[in-house]
Image: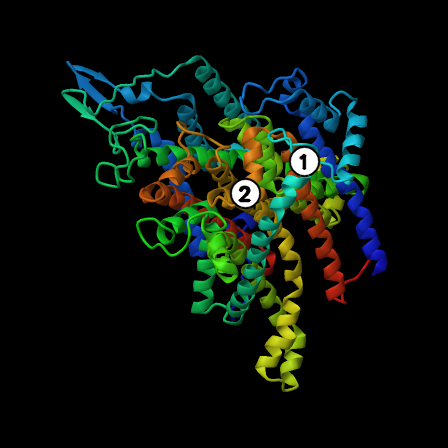
Amino acid sequence: MTTYILRRLLLIIPTLFGITLLTFLLVRLAPGNAALLKGGGGEGGGRAMTAEQRLATIKLYGLDKPPLVAYVDWVGRIARLDLGESWIDHRSVTAKIGERIGLTASIAGSALVLSYLIAIPLGVTAALRRGQGIDRVLTFILFLLYSIPNFAAALLLILFVAGGDYLNLLPMYGINSINASEMGTWGWIWDRILHMILPVVCLTYASLASISRYARVSMLEVLGQDFLRTARAKGLSERVVILRHALRNALIPLITIFTLELPVLIGGSVIIETIFSLPGMGQLMLQSLENRDNPTIMGITVLAALVTLGSYLIADILYVVVDPRMKYE
Amino acid sequence: MSTNPPVITNETYAHRVARRFQADAFARNGLRMVIFLFILATLAPFLANSHALIRVTDGQTSFPIFLSLDPIEWRFLIYVPLGGVVYLLRRRLLTHWRIALCLVVAVIALVEIVLAYSHPINDPTNDRDRAASFKLLPPIPYSPIETTRDQFAPPSWKHPCGTDSTGRDIAARMLHGARTSLSIGFVSQSIALFIGIVLGGLAGYYRGWTDIAVCRFIEIMDCFPSLLLILVIIGIFESQNNMFVIMAVIGFTSWTGVARLVRAEFLRLSVQPFTLAAQAIGATDLRVILRHLLPNSLGPILVVGTFGVASAILIESSLSFLGFGMQAPTPSWGDILNESRRYIDFAWWLAFFPGLAILITIMSYNFVGEGLRDAVDPRLRLK
């Protein structure tokens, strides 16, 4: 197993190289570079750069150096968590990301946990009643949820439950009410929870739908196995057969599903944070794109790719740890 | 299981897939819906236009609508029926595929050349108020980019889906927006299929270092969340509102699923006896790939392609929603939703109708994909 994990770790190296190279190429090929070197970028008004900023940026991407040298230089900086300085407010990109990553991680994380918690019972229920009414209704509803674009859902939820002409149960946007600081600790926490409900719901439902479909298929596959017949034959109660023997085996393939959901959640958080005005990474990304703040854009892109790569790695390792039948070639 | 003895038929694989696809109600209706949407998108200029179909003034008959069509509308009007004709005549065309290919290329070249030199007549006046002894207006007598004084009109008989902040008719914008979504979905997936088949095919057929290189490339691409990568590319190259660039970028970032699948299929098929037989009688690699491996993996490829179209449409509308895709005045479902954000507290129709349109489109494609997957799955063959 150790050899397998070591091999898997070694395979990261070319991928890391590719991720950084691709990101770097995007900056090199960006049409803004010539203007940047000439001291341009001024036509946007707010994004005019000072002379030091321009020098810092040229240094960051080594735009004055040959591509290879510049690339090696830049990777070295990333390794030291130096992502450069934002073109907009002179602050370090690492610091800007640092103060926002917590919110995005907590929203995406709770969406992921919630969708697993709801999806598994749904998928298992559908599998146990395969072909019956409840299975068909669940399958259809999940299909419907899976096809609703999250921005449309977010807008309609705001319209109907958060301050439109209809119900006014939940706050429309932001992470806290304006007067949150006067509410005391518990009041503040409750206020924060209320603000998080809609964003988390909007990120959860699509992942929920796809995870429960996987859960259903996985459970169906296990239900057809011989060891379940053995378990029933030796007189175990149906409850024990399902929960101890079938479910635990059905859960193994679901470990890797979160790697499929993570990129979707990262993309989704750009949309959801924009709609609900949440100061997270997604919102930062969109603001940076609108302001053509290249160092920040590149910083977030590299970070998102590294997080996804990390999740692939964790999933692969977890898989061999959990399932002793796995062969490590 | 049925007690009937196995019936030996000369049913081909394609027929079996079609029969099993037809047996699935969701898939059947999903396909009908997709075809219906394509018909709506093709006929959009005739369904929603402020120009009359036929107008008779002072004894002179004119067809103002045809003069107002722009190149993209002509393309839709010609290419979608052309696709239908090619499909209907597929048997005859396949037997003479060289002539057929030349004909299709010739038609496309002719259309493109004529379109390149023609300019639509931009007539800003509408035919609704124009006096004429006879006029036949489209069912929705408003053009998608035409502003009226009816701002924020809720849905009514006059405006079935209401109007937006500048009085544009939402029904007209949605009909014309359908062509944006459908064509971006279709073209970007064609690009993705092409890249995926070439790279996946090379990896699966030649194995070894080619395979390792392609697999690493797939893994690298998969590490970038696709929406994020597309946003970055479009943002950095400032190509918002450029339909062809958006198609290309979506295509270039969503081929990995196809490549994985084609690689797996080719790995499996290239050791099968029929491939070895073809190689043994001296068939070239290209011939083996194109005539033996590719046709045998077409079913699963089609499945991935169908789901891909659904996700491309979703990505396009997300981009437009974020202001990085097609932008007003070009009609696009995502863009209507983007505008609705500012007026969400009262103008529900701005969010509801385009949201519903995206939902129906994506769901139809997903139903078709599900149905196809079940239909081509050999494990279900006995049922």
Q: Position of residue A294 (x, y in %)?
A: 63, 30
Q: Mark 2 or 1 closer to N-term?
A: 1
Is B134 displayed left or right of B63 in the figure?
A: left
- For numbered disc 2, what is the local secondary structure? helix
Q: Residue at x 82, y 56 (%)?
A: A4
Q: Which residue is mark 2?
A: A270
Q: Nearer the viewer, residue A203 or B77?
A: A203
Q: Is residue A214 left or right of residue B84?
A: right
Residue drawn at (44%, 17%) of the image = B115
Residue B21 in view of the camera: no
The front one of A56 and B93 is A56
Q: Secondary structure at mark 1?
A: loop
Residue B232 visible from this viewpoint: yes
Q: Amino acid at mark 2?
A: Val
Q: Quadrant of residue B50?
A: top left
Q: Is residue A209 above or below residue B164?
A: below
Q: Is residue B85 above or below residue A167?
A: above
Compare residues B131 and A298 and report the one nearer the observer.
Answer: A298
Q: Amino acid at mark 1?
A: Ser
Along the horizontal axis of the image, is B43 left or right of A86?
left
Does B340 sit above or below residue A310? above
Q: Which residue is mark 1?
A: A92
Q: Position of residue B282 (x, y in %)?
A: 77, 37
